[in-house]
Image (cartoon, rainbow, N blue to C red):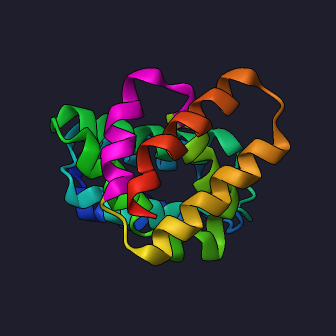
Amino acid sequence: MYSIEECSIEECLQILNKMKMMCNEDDDIEVFDKALYKVRMEGDMSAIEKLYTALDDETEGPSSAMMDILESIIDISERCNQLEEGIYIFLSNGYKIIKNATDWFEMFNRLLLYTRRLHEYYIFAIKRLDKKNLEILLDTLDDIEKKNNVDYLKESIDLIREKIKSIE
């Protein structure tokens, strides 16, 4: 069994990756949550690149666990006063993330679109993306727009598109 209090951040990240599917006999959502909480509270920006690897669309665990990972990425970035960088790290790995976690990549973008105070950081992060990841992001925004008939989301997506036109 795991004693999370004694685990390093790296060990907690390994636990998250090992248990992300929640399909093995020794997978425990409470241990997963404690490991994630420790990473969220004590991890630095380097944890973000490892956190996104714990996302998976096929998890058998509660979807709230995956949502907590997304929120942890924002929380770590905020705690480290590097919101733009945290968002950029996630988005710049879009091509890796969509292999196993397309839904969670979309959900992260949806989270940013719904959170007005993050729009500026989101836009600056998007402007730094390479062509491949920008294309993935724009396709994701198209999917979000098609699936949702919510004025606020449409307005946010239009704002993002307008602000990033110069880099397309």
Is residue 84 placed above or below 168 in the rendered structure?
Answer: above
The residue sitting at 66% across, 62% down in the picture is 139
Q: In this view, does 146 lie to the left or right of 3?
A: right
Horizontal and vertical percent position of residue 44 = 18, 50
Using residue 109 as the reference point, say whether residue 75 is left or right of it. Answer: left
Where is the N terminus found, in terms of image quarters? bottom left
The span shown in magenta is 113-127
Q: Does 132 sit left or right of 79 as displayed?
A: right
Front-most of residues 89 and 162: 162
Q: Which of 5 and 116 is in front in this view?
A: 116
| Corner quadrant of residue 52 | bottom left
Is residue 73 shown in magenta?
no
- The majority secondary structure of the magenta stretch comes to helix
As displayed, is residue 109 above or below residue 51?
above
> Is the residue 10 above or below the residue 159 in the image?
below
Residue 56 visible in the picture:
yes
Q: Is residue 16 above or below residue 161?
A: below
Q: How far from the left and from the top, in percent, is residue 100? A: 64, 72
Give coordinates of residue 36: x percent, y percent: 41, 46
- Asked whether 120 falls inside the magenta stretch, the response is yes
Q: Residue at x 71, y 53 (%)?
A: 142
Tell me which residue sits at (75%, 58%) in the image: 60
**Residue under the point 39% across and 42% down:** 122
Residue 46 location in percent, x, y? Answer: 21, 60
